[in-house]
Image (cartoon, rainbow, N blue to C red):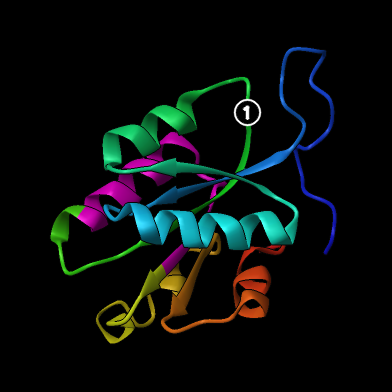
């Protein structure tokens, strides 16, 4: 895996571990994806809802390099991804879903967006999270 931009020491109090925010309403799914993220060598942070995810993205003591968003069939998730993008235009966002056909082609318009259809393997998740996007 290549080095992560922004993972250098920021002067002491800041974390230097590249962090991935995992957004899903189901705790079991967050934990499963979190374990996969740890195996890749990144630090997972779980968010149960959009507000939690956006609060994590606003923290200045973290090096958030990506967000994994498990999409269900709600239009509010699209708004959440847009809000994440507004908070950090360079944030890598990996969308996980079993209905990816509804999002097909969205990554063509956003170079920091990856789509990962379910089911997926650890290697596929690692590839989706790898820089550069």
Query: Residue at label 1?
Result: 62
**Looking at the image, is 25 positioned above or below residue 98?**
above
Q: Quadrant of the C terminus?
A: bottom right
What is the magenta range?
77-95
Task: Indicate whether 65 appears above or below 59.
Answer: below
Helix, strand or loop under label 1 = loop
Image coords of residue 23 (percent x, y): 38, 50
Q: Position of residue 113 (x, y in %)?
A: 49, 64
Q: Quadrant of the N terminus?
A: bottom right
Q: Could you tell whether 113 is left or right of 100 in the image?
A: right
Left or right: residue 33 versus residue 27 is right
| Residue found 81% across the figure and 13% down from its top | 12
Front in this rendered view, residue 11 or 17: 17
Viewer can see residue 133: yes
Is 88 placed above or below 39 here? above
For the residue pair 118 and 83, the one nearer the viewer reads as: 118
Q: Position of residue 122 (x, y in %)?
A: 63, 75
- Camera sees residue 93: no
Label 1 Cα neighbours within 10 Å, binned few <14 / some 14-19 / many ≥20: many
Q: Nearer the viewer, residue 29 or 24?
A: 29
């Amino acid at each position: 895996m290549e080095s992560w931009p922004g993972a250098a020491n920021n002067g002491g109090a800041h974390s230097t571990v590249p962090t991935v925010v995992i957004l899903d309403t189901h705790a079991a799914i967050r934990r499963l994806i979190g374990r996969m993220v740890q195996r890749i060598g990144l630090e997972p942070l779980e968010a149960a809802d959009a507000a939690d995810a956006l609060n994590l993205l606003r923290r200045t003591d973290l090096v958030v390099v990506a967000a994994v968003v498990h999409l269900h069939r709600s239009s509010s998730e699209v708004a959440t991804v847009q809000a994440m993008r507004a908070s950090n235009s360079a944030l890598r966002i990996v969308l996980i879903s079993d209905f990816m056909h509804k999002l097909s082609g969205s990554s063509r318009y956003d170079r920091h967006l990856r789509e990962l259809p379910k089911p997926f393997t650890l290697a596929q998740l690692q590839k989706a999270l790898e820089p550069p996007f």
